[in-house]
Image (spheres, helix red, strand yellow):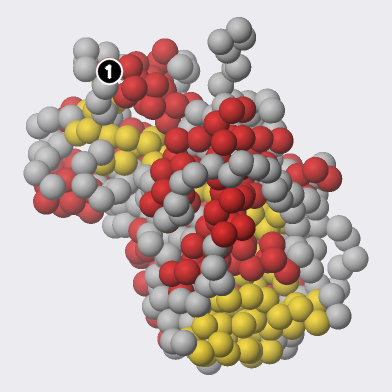
Amino acid sequence: MNVIVVGTGIAGLTAALRADEAGHDVMIVTKGLLGGGCTPLAQGGIAGVYGEGDSPASHAEDTIIAGAGLSDPAAVEVLVREGGARIAELVARGVVFDRGPDGRLLLGREAAHSHARVVHAGGDATGAAVSDALVAAVRASAIQVREHAFLLDLIVLDGAVRGIRLLEGTAAVDLSADAVILATGGAGRLYAHTTNPEGATGDGIAAALRAGADVADLEFVQFHPTVLAEGPGFLISEAVRGEGATLLDDDDRRFAFDAHPDGELAPRDVVSRAIARRTAAQGGPVRLDATALGASTLARRFPTIDRVTRERGFDWARQPIPVTPAAHYLMGGIVTDLDGRTTLPGLFAVGEAARSGVHGANRLASNSLLEGAVFGARAAVALGVASGADPALGLPPRQRKRPLRRDESPRPARDFSRAALQMLMWDEVGLLRTDDGLTRALDLIQSWRTDLPAPRSVAQHEDANLLLLAEAAASAALARTESVGAHFREPALIGV
């Protein structure tokens, strides 16, 4: 088969390598450089190595609890059953995970995990180690690589995806394929504060939505609790809290316990909301205190964070550092079955671009790299295998519909810019949501979409994609009236 993989994170590279090894003709397409995206930035590790007293069943239970009960049990079972083999495959491809003096893998514990089951590479450089190894394997293979090629749209013929349309420079280029695998990541650039790189504009999800593929759960956006509050967004890994760092308010009180008995190691949505509320109450950022770990441990265990914080003027071994939540991961995306198939024949989706069913309403820490490896491999195996099953995995029909346009008047008077959209999403479709705020956001987003001129440049196409996904996310958030997981609705104020 002629297979095109769009995206070069762990999910896309795994799918491409496995497809190449199965004898398919494979081309990787990326709008940046090979090995870009979110994967090389991942500080956290990969869950799925079980020590004494731990098991895949326990990992599955933690995943479903973190997902607020909305994870698909079959997808979670696949994740934990196949995770060990995928981690072993990464080792075989050259990823050097951290080991103790006895040669055994070092296992870390992160928030909402009941056991230490997370492996790391280079302390806090797991994603970079994984990306480097997979890129090297791609370069040593027969896989073609097309860089600086922006995905415009999917080519759909007779109801099936048969290729992609790219923008290269100023020229549109059509490429045919027997199958297309979208591994384009999420859409963190919808928000004013995010851990995601500049290119995380949801291009694959938007293209799939335009082509008629089902999407779901776009209201579930995970905000990482601890991002350095000064300077460009820089993530302070959850593993730091797993090692014993604490969150303090201006009174040096560990306020996270007010929100959950697990305090700093509660699920990410709970900790993020606790930080947001405390920050608003005290008029400034809370602080992450890692001083008890000591300078040598911090430098050894978290070398990247240690270097960056010091470059920004913080000695985190001596003083707590200011942190804030930031948009980190999109749990929803293109609806798939357990092999990455979407509702469009010929189209697969893997990684953060996919709604595989694993994450539910809130992703468990260190399950994202694992998901990319597991389902990237499964999609490659499934190429060319027909399936008549509806991959919706039991989603209610209202979640699977494309968002409706509401041409209401008068339109809100506010000029569009990407920065304005990002602040609107942060304020109204962020950590704390209200019915009125979501309605205002949706009205403004739809007016912007109506007035947006036809895009020509990559940046303009990104803006159009962000607006489409913003409309879908705001619509889904407005439709889901109950609070669950990362989607939190503030109660209406009666009589105000």
Is residue 370 depicted above or below 62 in this figure?
Answer: below
Task: State the residue at coordinates (63%, 89%).
Answer: 175
Can you see residue 340? Answer: no
Is residue 214 depicted above or below 471 in this figure?
Answer: below
Q: Which amino acid, by three-letter code, is at mark 1?
A: Gln
Q: Quadrant of residue 316?
A: top left
Q: Position of residue 355 (x, y in %)?
A: 66, 53
Q: Is residue 265 left or right of residue 291?
A: right
Instruction: Say which quadrant the C terminus sits in.
Output: top right
Q: Is residue 264 left or right of residue 67?
A: left
Task: State the residue at coordinates (62%, 82%).
Answer: 165
Q: Is residue 493 left or right of residue 38?
A: right
Task: State the residue at coordinates (45%, 17%).
Answer: 259
Q: Quadrant of residue 314?
A: top left
Q: Give the camera-side residue of 413 and 389.
A: 413
Q: Give the camera-side residue of 149 and 317.
A: 149
Q: Is residue 412 left or right of residue 135?
A: right
Task: State the residue at coordinates (83%, 45%).
Answer: 397
Instruction: Say which quadrant the N terminus sits in.
Output: bottom right
Considering the numbered disc 1 on the image, is that residue within a helix, a strand or a loop? Answer: helix
Q: Position of residue 194 (x, y in %)?
A: 39, 48
Report which residue position mark 1 lands on. Answer: 282
Is residue 326 depicted above or below 168 in this figure?
Answer: above
Q: Position of residue 376 (x, y in %)?
A: 61, 66
Q: Position of residue 406 (x, y in %)?
A: 71, 46
Extreme residue toward the front, this view: 410
Can you see residue 305? Answer: yes
Q: Give the camera-side residue of 436 and 377.
A: 436
